[in-house]
């Protein structure tokens, strides 16, 4: 295998980690929001989401670094100035910002759930409201949709 093929392997591995982590995080988030759970359950689910986000973050870094390197090494004449490359970078930045803001909101909810679990581990309407916070959900799921859009750009490469 040549350099380009190795770079492609690591880039695609990063993309799978990124998207896999995103799917796991979204599934756990939906599980937490489905019904009024005990605070200890919410703490557990949000803790598992943090693990999924680690995979997502590592994957995003791998995909980004090796993706840029691929553009440099590609035998197909790709350029850092190509519209699909610029769009992918901008969408990745926007996805990270949105996911970070949504994650901070979820972190506050996890701390609230932990405090409730330590007091009285019974379902709380306030906790359910926080878990179903439309802004946090929109930010988190919007971030995931942007990752899917990046995947589409990588596969389609419009203008290339």
Image (cartoon, grey):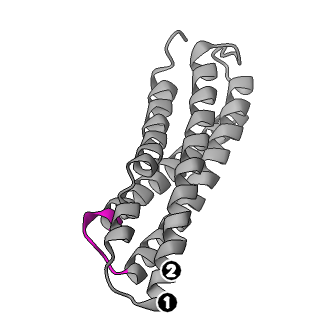
> Is residue 130 or residue 19 the one in the foreground?
130
Q: From the viewer's perspective, is 68 left or right of 130?
A: right
Q: Is residue 98 magenta?
A: no
Is any part of residue 71 visible from this angle?
Answer: yes
Q: Is residue 37 magenta?
A: yes
Q: Which residue is mark 2?
A: 114
Is any part of residue 13 visible from this angle?
Answer: no
Q: From the viewer's perspective, is 138 left or right of 53?
A: left
Residue 71: quadrant of the picture: top right
Q: Which mark is residue 79?
A: none
Q: Which mark is residue 118?
A: 1
| Residue 16 placement (x, y as % from top left) | 50, 48
Residue 40: quadrant of the picture: bottom left
Q: In the rendered structure, which segment of residues is drawn in magenta?
A: 32-38
Mark 1 packing: few (<14 Cα in 10 Å), some, or many (20+)? Answer: few
Residue at 31 percent of width and 65 percent of height: 31
In the displayed structure, would residue 1 be above or below residue 17? above
Quarter of the rendering occupied by the C terminus: top right
Q: From the viewer's perspective, is 122 left or right of 106?
A: left
Quarter of the rendering occupied by the N terminus: top right
| Residue 49 placement (x, y as % from top left) | 48, 65
- Element on which disc 1 rests: helix
Residue at 63 percent of width and 29 percent of height: 89
Residue at 55 percent of width and 64 percent of height: 107
């Amino acid at each position: 295998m040549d350099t380009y093929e190795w770079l492609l392997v690591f880039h695609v591995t990063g993309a799978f980690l990124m998207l896999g982590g995103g799917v796991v995080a979204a599934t756990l988030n939906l599980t937490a929001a489905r019904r009024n759970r005990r605070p200890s359950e919410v703490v557990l689910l949000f803790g598992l989401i943090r693990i999924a986000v680690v995979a997502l973050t590592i994957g995003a870094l791998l995909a980004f670094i090796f993706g840029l390197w691929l553009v440099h090494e590609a035998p197909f004449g790709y350029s850092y100035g190509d519209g699909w490359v610029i769009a992918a970078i901008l969408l990745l930045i926007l996805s990270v910002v949105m996911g970070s803001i949504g994650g901070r909101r979820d972190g506050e909810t996890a701390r609230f759930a932990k405090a409730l679990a330590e007091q009285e581990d019974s379902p709380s309407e306030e906790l359910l409201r926080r878990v179903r916070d439309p802004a946090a959900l929109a930010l988190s799921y919007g971030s995931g949709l942007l990752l899917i859009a990046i995947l589409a750009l990588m596969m389609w490469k419009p203008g290339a």
